[in-house]
Image (cartoon, rainbow, N blue to C red):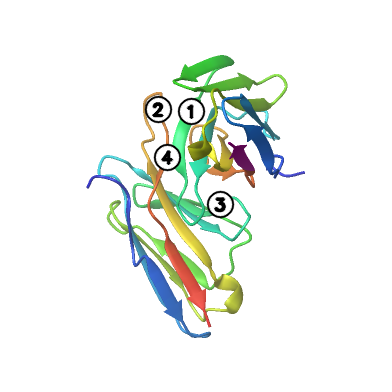
Amino acid sequence: QKEVEQNSGPLSVPEGAIASLNCTYSDRGSQSFFWYRQYSGKSPELIMSIYSNGDKEDGRFTAQLNKASQYVSLLIRDSQPSDSATYLCAVRGSSASKIIFGSGTRLSIRP
Amino acid sequence: DTGVSQNPRHKITKRGQNVTFRCDPISEHNRLYWYRQTLGQGPEFLTYFQNEAQLEKSRLLSDRFSAERPKGSFSTLEIQRTEQGDSAMYLCASSPSFGGNTEAFFGQGTRLTVV
């Protein structure tokens, strides 16, 4: 079992719709959760972090965390073509541990 | 520019040669991470430092790879006797280790091609 799992996609969503990206993790003691966006040929860019159960909203992005289910999600509202990218879920276990990434989900927003 | 800086941006080397990459983290960040990424995959953890201490190294990493952070500031990643399978993007990230915000930020990466 991989430490952080994501559906590789591609996930195709029409412009203006909500894109939903999901991630599960294996370490029940994990404390910090991150979503990164990566355009082709570029390095990952942090878009959201979440540390406690529930929802966290930032503009068009909402991160959701459910530690009991070991599940993290990212919702993108009013999807734009510029949101087309690979979205990486990342998890840190205890406060002194490394950050582990999933393999990413390719998102395509169709006009 | 106060972001994470990596040099060089691109490196082409012949198989069997040694290469060294440099990473300058965000100045107030005491954690520094190295990752390797190949096409279609997420960043694969290589090693990380807190200040000058190397706290963990991936078990998948061969002895040809070594990293240092001698004064707790910049870091270098060396690959000895490069192989074609080492061709990848090498990413560096840094983060603080205190407070409630431990977000990691990436540099632009070093793309290595072994021919």
Residue A59 pos. (x, y %): 44, 20
Residue drawn at the location 67% of the way across and 38% of the way down:
A12
Q: CA distance from mark 4 to mark 1?
A: 10 Å
Residue B77 pos. (x, y %): 42, 65
Q: CA distance from mark 2 to mark 1?
A: 9 Å
Q: CA distance from mark 3 to mark 4?
A: 13 Å
Q: Are marks 3 and 2 on the same chain?
A: yes
Residue drawn at the location 56% of the way across and 71% of the way down:
B86
Identity, as a three-letter code, of the amino acid under mark 1? Ser
Asked whether A73 falls inside the magenta stretch, the response is: no
Up-down relation of residue A24 to residue A98 (above or below): above
For mark 1, what is the residue? A49
- Please rate how many residues cluster around mark 1, counting C-alpha atoms within 10 Å: few if below 14, some from 14 to 19, many from 20: many
Q: Are marks 4 and 1 on the same chain?
A: no
Residue drawn at the location 46% of the way across and 33% of the way down:
A47
Labels 1 and 3 touching (C-beta < 8 A)? no
Farthest residue to the top: give it: A54
The local secondary structure at tag 2 comes to: loop
Residue B104 numbered tag: 4
Residue B99 pos. (x, y %): 37, 25
The local secondary structure at tag 4 comes to: loop
Q: Quadrant of residue A75?
A: top right
Residue A34 numbered tag: none
Q: Nearer the viewer, mark 3 or mark 2?
A: 3
For mark 2, what is the residue? B101
Q: CA distance from mark 4 to mark 2?
A: 9 Å
For mark 3, what is the residue? B43
Identity, as a three-letter code, of the amino acid under mark 3? Pro
Labels 2 and 1 touching (C-beta < 8 A)? yes
The local secondary structure at tag 1 comes to: strand
